[in-house]
């Protein structure tokens, strides 16, 4: 039968609550007797704490406690990041002990009857510092006489790796054209609509901690909190209500959350904390900052011969607690070859600590691989005299070659990035775009056209994990519980934790088709570790579309079978002679004799409940080609995006409107990184963007309309050409892609607009001032 809900742009069921203010966020919750917490943070990037005087603050009106690291030590041990091969991770404390290591480092926690009282008391805390030399960049960190951020490690280099396939040295010697350059990517913040927020409530009678938080992985937070506090996992419950965006920031265990939970245990009362925007920009984590020294060689006909990359990443001061930082470099290495024909490949990486906020995952945390690869392909195309699209076309693996996987052994089944490139160049007549750009330049305007292509693990496959070296075992199985309720509706319990993705809608669409139920009869429960299935990762890494959908489809199928069996027993009709139709089980030849789902619920002593499970096979990929046309103002350096197009293959969409929204949101973030956002620090380690006056987030006026074209449409199993055995879960994640492809495509277009002036662009951040300086120098 043709899918009725799946594939339709059904309106999101969450939006009425979100748009009318009836959605509950962590900061909305109020518990009787709850205290309000404020953190006193370091104004220095690197300093020794020589004394803390909290006496006056403790005597303030409404103040219940002022905690230093020592005050919490009885219930909160030092934080030991999990061991990871070849990665140095310092043991550290939730509140700074004797040294602060970045501007914003939490030193003292104040708990008071009101937020105002806590803020007033925080102003009365006196902390004495002895400044130390800051480590403000990778160059500082790697200098022979560098200050060591973590003396316990004895070095600022916390991870190094080297991998070689083939003989890159020989291949580069034989190359007709070699591009040698440094590709630079700047530091950005996530800037979610909702800053971090938490509410800790420890019950001294039961010894149980209930921790409510804006977080994207409730069970991960539960496990990490329990470990940090020395509690049994069964004594920790994590609840995550609506989350106003995360993009990777609200993951792992934040030091503030550990301190807040410890404070609740010490006080025997709930303690709430809501982060300010300045705290979020300073201390919630940053991403992307890295540079890569690249050598890439080509034959005269444009054949890719060899690639050598050395990647240096600035991790900030503290390790993220929950994901090993080496995984970022491993992802870049494993994905760099993408679907290109590459036999000779050398990759090395260095990761350093500096006196900055922690490096955390951000939408498509491997985005550097796309940016650097697409940048050097553009540079090489110009030197070879080839159209950039043609250079890519000549080097993308054929379908037969993809059967062998990438040069690193990554399974490429399901990859169709070459098709997205062909679709884009054919559908959108890119040649005409280039003609328009050339005509505009002839008239004195700086107009350019650029593109990027990429593959997106959606989600990460076992072969990619093996190539990364993180683990060589299958992923954990995704589970979904589905229960028939007394009113004839159903309730889904999922480990997915939405923070803007629309899971209540998409998962209900799948159940609605599986059980022939209207969506108003389907409830989706998430975000409570007491009731949802266990999975360390809630929502992240584009898992939901494939893994969660697979589990939900399996659960719907199991409940359908169970209902057919219950009805068969009652009606004394074989299950094969029954069917599920419009919330009832009916005989195929006598539908009037059927039983509604409510009837079946009443006949069962317990509410029928099933557990669906799913573990995807290898080869779960999305991919896209992005095209951009821009105009650069010759006088100011300002960039106007004239047209932006995405050709996407993420399999058939469950909900096209939600998929397109994901793509457009990612594109907006990528555009913002190029033209607006920069979590800048000066050479003294002082942050230069602590408010939205300095950290420039684009508005709707700066983000263009994004045209989206899909290679696949909705599923129609009744179609004449439908396969005999269609993929039971053909859906692919699309959460990362827009943010991965857009920086490379936009910079490609900007460079194309100014390349005739002799300008090559190797850095991602291109606000007007930077481009104005490039244009000024080119005219000298």
Image (spheres, helix red, strand yellow):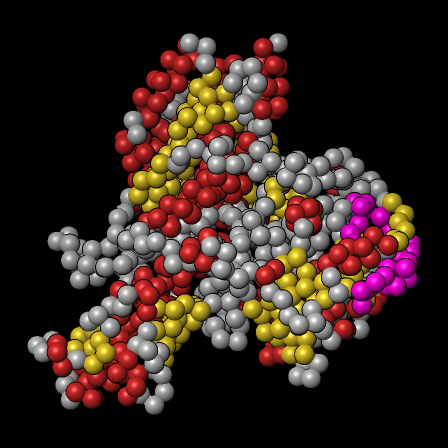
Residue found at x 72% / y 45%: 356
Q: Report the front residue among 729 and 715.
A: 715
Say left or right for 722 vs 634: left
Residue 63 magenta-drawn?
yes
Q: On the rendered image, what quadrant is the N terminus found in?
A: bottom left
Instruction: Please say if 258 is above or below 168.
Output: below
Question: From which residue to which does the magenta span run?
Answer: 38-64
Q: Report the front residue among 140 and 695.
A: 695
Residue found at x 28% / y 88%: 603
Which quarter of the picture shows residue 463? bottom left
Q: Report the front residue among 598 and 143.
A: 598
| Residue 254 screen position, x and y as percent | 66, 59
Residue found at x 24% / y 55%: 715
| Residue 362 screen position, x and y as percent | 55, 48
Q: On the rendered image, what quadrant is the C terminus found in?
A: top right
Say left or right for 164 vs 611: right
């Amino acid at each position: 039968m043709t899918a009725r809900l799946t594939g339709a742009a059904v309106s999101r069921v969450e939006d009425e609550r979100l748009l009318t203010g009836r959605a509950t966020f962590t900061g909305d919750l109020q518990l009787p007797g709850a205290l309000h917490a404020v953190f006193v943070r370091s104004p220095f990037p690197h300093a020794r704490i020589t004394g803390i005087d909290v006496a006056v603050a403790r005597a303030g009106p409404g103040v219940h406690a002022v905690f230093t690291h020592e005050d919490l030590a009885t219930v909160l041990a030092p934080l030991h990041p999990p061991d990871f091969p070849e990665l140095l991770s310092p043991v550290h404390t939730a509140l700074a002990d004797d040294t602060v290591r970045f501007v914003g480092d939490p030193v003292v926690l104040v708990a008071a009857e009101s937020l105002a009282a806590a803020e007033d008391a925080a102003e009365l805390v006196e902390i004495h510092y002895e400044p130390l030399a800051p480590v403000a960049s990778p160059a500082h960190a790697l200098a022979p006489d560098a200050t060591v951020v973590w003396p316990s490690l004895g070095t600022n280099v916390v991870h190094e790796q080297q991998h070689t396939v083939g003989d890159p040295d020989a291949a580069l010697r034989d190359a007709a054209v070699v591009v040698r350059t440094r590709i630079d990517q700047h530091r950005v913040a996530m800037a979610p609509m909702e800053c971090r927020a938490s509410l800790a409530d420890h019950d001294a009678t039961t010894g149980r901690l209930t921790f409510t938080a804006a977080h994207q992985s409730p069970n991960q937070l539960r496990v990490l909190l329990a470990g940090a506090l020395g509690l049994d996992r069964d004594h920790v419950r994590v609840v995550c209500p609506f989350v106003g965006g995360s993009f990777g920031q609200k993951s792992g265990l934040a030091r503030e959350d550990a301190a807040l939970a410890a404070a609740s245990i010490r006080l025997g009362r709930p303690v709430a904390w809501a982060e300010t925007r300045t705290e979020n920009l300073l201390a919630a984590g940053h991403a992307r900052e890295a540079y890569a020294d690249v050598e890439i060689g080509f034959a005269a006909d444009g054949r890719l011969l060899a690639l050598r990359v050395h990647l240096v990443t600035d991790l900030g001061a503290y390790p993220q607690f929950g994901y090993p930082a080496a995984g970022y470099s491993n992802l870049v290495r494993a994905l760099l070859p993408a679907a290109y024909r590459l036999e000779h490949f050398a990759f090395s990486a260095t990761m350093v600590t500096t006196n900055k906020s922690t490096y955390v995952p951000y939408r498509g945390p491997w985005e550097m691989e796309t940016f650097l690869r697409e940048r050097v392909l553009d540079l090489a195309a110009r030197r070879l005299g080839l159209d950039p699209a043609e250079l890519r076309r000549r080097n993308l693996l054929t379908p037969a070659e993809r059967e062998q996987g990438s040069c690193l052994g990554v399974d490429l089944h399901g990859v169709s990035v070459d098709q997205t490139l062909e679709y884009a160049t054919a559908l959108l007549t890119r040649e005409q775009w280039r003609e328009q750009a050339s005509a505009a330049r002839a008239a004195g305007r700086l107009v350019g056209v650029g593109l990027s292509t990429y593959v997106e693990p959606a989600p990460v496959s076992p072969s990619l994990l093996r190539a990364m070296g993180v683990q060589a075992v299958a992923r954990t199985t995704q589970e979904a519980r589905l229960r028939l309720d007394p009113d004839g509706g159903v309730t889904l319990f999922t480990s997915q934790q939405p923070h803007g993705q629309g899971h209540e809608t998409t998962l209900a669409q799948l159940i609605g088709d599986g059980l022939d139920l209207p969506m108003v009869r389907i409830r989706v429960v998430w975000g409570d570790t007491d009731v949802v299935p266990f999975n360390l990762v809630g929502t992240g890494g584009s898992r939901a579309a494939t893994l969660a959908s697979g589990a939900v489809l399996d659960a719907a199928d199991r409940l359908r079978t169970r209902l057919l069996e219950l009805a068969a027993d009652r009606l004394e009709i074989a299950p094969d002679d029954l069917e599920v139709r419009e919330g009832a089980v009916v005989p195929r030849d006598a539908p009037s004799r059927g039983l509604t789902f409510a009837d079946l619920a009443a006949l069962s002593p317990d509410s029928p409940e099933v557990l669906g499970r799913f573990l995807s096979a290898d080869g779960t990929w999305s991919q896209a080609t992005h095209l951009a046309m821009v105009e650069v103002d010759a006088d100011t350096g300002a960039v106007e995006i004239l047209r932006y197009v995405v050709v996407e293959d993420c399999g058939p969409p469950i909900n096209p409107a939600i998929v397109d929204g994901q793509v457009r949101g990612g594109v907006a973030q990528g555009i913002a990184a190029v033209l607006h956002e920069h979590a800048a620090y000066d050479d003294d380690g002082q942050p230069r963007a602590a408010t939205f006056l300095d950290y420039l987030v684009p508005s709707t006026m700066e983000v263009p309309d994004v045209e989206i074209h899909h290679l696949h449409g909705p599923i129609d199993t009744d179609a004449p050409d439908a396969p005999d055995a269609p993929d039971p879960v053909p859906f692919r994640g699309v959460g990362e892609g827009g943010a991965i492809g857009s920086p490379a495509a936009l910079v490609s277009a900007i460079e194309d607009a100014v390349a005739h002036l002799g300008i090559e662009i190797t850095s991602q951040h291109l606000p007007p001032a930077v481009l104005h300086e490039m244009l000024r120098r080119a005219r000298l």
